[in-house]
Image (cartoon, rainbow, N blue to C red):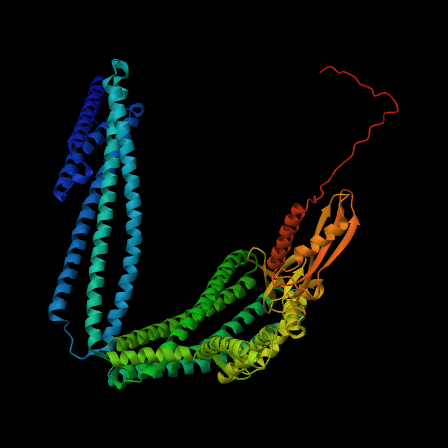
Amino acid sequence: MRLIPEPFRTIKIVSLTVLAVAALAAVCLAQEASPSPAAHSSAEQITAERNALAGALEEARRALQAAAPENSDGLRRQMAQLQQLDLLYAQELDLLKQQQELAAARDQMHDALRQMNSAGINEPRPYSILLLDGAQDELESIEDQVEAIEATVRAAEEALQQARDLAAERERQRRAAREAFETNHDPVSSAPLETALQLAQLDSRVAQEQARVRELELANEKVGRDAQQARVAVLRAKVELIARDACLKKDELDKQLAEIDKDDTELRRSLSASKRELETADRRFMAAQQRAERQENAPAVAAEVEARRRAREALQLEVSGFGQRLQKLVEQRQLWQRRYQVSEEAPTRAQLSQWEQESQQALQQLTREERIQRTRLAQLRQSAKALGDSIVEQAQTEPEVAKWLIEQQESLQEQSATYEALLTGLETVRHLHDKLLRQIARRNASINWRERVGLVWDRLRAGWSFEITAIEDRPITVGKIVVGFILLAGGFIVARRLSRWLGRRLFPRLGLDVHAAAALQSISFYVLLSLLTLFALNVINVPLTIFTFVGGALAIGVGFGSQNIVNNFISGLILLAERPIKVGDLIEVDGTKGTVERIGPRSTRILGEGNIDILVPNSHFLERNVINWTLKNDLLRTHVEVGVAYGTAVDRVTQLLRQSVAGHEHILDHPAPEVVFANFGDNALQFEVHFWIHVRTPMQKRLLESDVRYRIERLFAENGISIAFPQRDVHLDTTTPLSVRVVKE
């Protein structure tokens, strides 16, 4: 080994370090002068920058090998940054290559779409419906992939934004480091600041290249999405083209049915074997239970009993699963036959509608079954995982128990396999139902306008005949309910108009007055409405026993919350029958005066003063005191009060009061008016003049009383009689001198 003198070794290390720093500075300057990440337009530019980086890497490696340990931290960091840059360049080259491949695949799909639109597909006509099924399945798979790619694109956009933010932050740090280095005038701290600047430049460059990688990844995801979308367009065009002339041939149907028969035979053979195994499992389980009864505290025996039980449950599930799969095979056979009929035998519109409805209901049922089975499968897998942990714990201490735990785990795995097979069968049946529905939809879309109208009519008839419920084995359909509502609405209109005709035309001709006619009109409306309601229910064939439940519910409602409504309704019927008040009567109830306008089923409408409608519950007229001013007739006696001063001739006052009501056109002469000297008041002699009038409203009564007061005031003025007003006499006690005092303010 050749020894190098110490001074020469030191000189060599310093020189290598200077060369490495110079190389790094050159790379950094070249990178600062190089275009931004977005400006990398070709693989050649990235390759050139990577080659330039290789020299700096080699020089940095030599400098790091020759540097002293205490001076190698900065070089190690620079070395790591340069290596990361090299990896980023390599990743960019791979992404560019991948982008070219994806673009080529996209262009190829566009060319295939143009060729298919112009020349069609290279298959003999009529196309096989199996070919259509394959294209449809592939289309659904690619559409699912496009949805997944959309989510990936959104994630790539978020990653790109984060990378750009990081690059901007690293660039701010680089500018700060450069400013610190350029403004420094201390030779001692110049070298550390220069190293910090170089590291900041490398950090900024790495962040920029990472952003460039994220840009390329996003671009590749978008190109891949475009390629998949182009593939979707090709498959859609292919599906549309095949669907125009696709059919299920007889030999293809026979082939599918033969495969179903083959599966049926294999399942029945497996079912028989599983039943024999189940009998054996039952005997083993019973024997294990007997041993457990003799050895109560043996852990291994208890584990064996549990293992035998799980094995029996697994076989029971297997037998049940084979039965369910056999049923699904029957459904598959029926679906293939229906597909053949839709394709070749031209079923009726009613059959197509029925098959469509049955398939939709079957899909809903399949969804529920699949949800249940997936839940059970997840529970089994969780139990198997827990058993695996127990096996590891028992393997060291209780090997015999661990052996039975392993058998329990195997039984759980067998049950999981059974559920997976059931899920596979459900998925197969689901696909067949979906294909039958698409086939029916294509068949309906290709019919002429007459058949289309007939199809719409069939669907309307099906909806019209849809059964909502049943009463006494009689269906209640949508059509019956609609007809019932129409008849009820028509019956209401007929009852309203017929009752009005009776009240306005027939009853007056029979000699009934207006009030009796109004009451009978209301009663006849309710009777007619009830009869027409019963007629409507009989027409739509709804049994009247349905009202047994309604009657019970009504009775409960009366007892708990509807007693006021029923009370008012019955009160209204009593008012109409007994007639304590009638339409047109002037009444007063609870201080409210007005004319009765209408007696309804719940309330009575009264027209009060000021043309105000007042609604009073019917029960108020039976439970409270009601003043009916016109119960028998509209003849009413009223009076006007007046007071005259003491000392006035009372005979003259009586004469003038009689004169004030005499000869009035609305005041009756028979019965004759009466004047009453009512009382000796505090300030006046009080008189009352009583007279009879015909009145129908409160305002008529008030107007007549006002007119009489006008006459009284005029006659008293002409005859010098003063109408008294309140007076007070003040008496002072003068038996002693009055005391007078002056008080200051």
- Relative to 202, residue 255 above or below: below
Of residue 75 and residue 695, the one placed in the foreground of this image is 695
Location of the C terminus by quadrant is top right
Q: Could you tell me if residue 18 is visible in this image?
A: yes
Of residue 714 and residue 205, the one placed in the foreground of this image is 714
Side of 422 where 408 appears, left or right? right
Q: Position of residue 397 (x, y in %)?
A: 56, 57
Q: Position of residue 583 (x, y in %)?
A: 60, 68
Which quadrant of the structure image shows residue 447?
A: bottom left
Q: Identify the residue shown where x is 20% and y is 75%.
A: 244
Side of 442 where 634 appears, left or right? right
- The outermost residue toward the right is 735
- Relative to 106, residue 321 above or below: below
Location of the N terminus by quadrant is top left
Q: Identify the residue shown where x is 85% and y is 25%.
A: 734
- Relative to 395, residue 685 above or below: above
Which quadrant of the structure image shows residue 3?
A: top left
Q: Position of residue 275 (x, y in %)?
A: 49, 81
Of residue 60 and residue 114, the one placed in the foreground of this image is 114
Q: Could you tell me if residue 295 is visible in this image?
A: no
- Relative to 619, residue 453 above or below: below
Side of 284 where 296 appears, left or right? right
Q: Position of residue 296 (x, y in %)?
A: 66, 67
Q: Identify the residue shown where x is 57% and y is 76%.
A: 521
Side of 39 where 77 appears, left or right? right
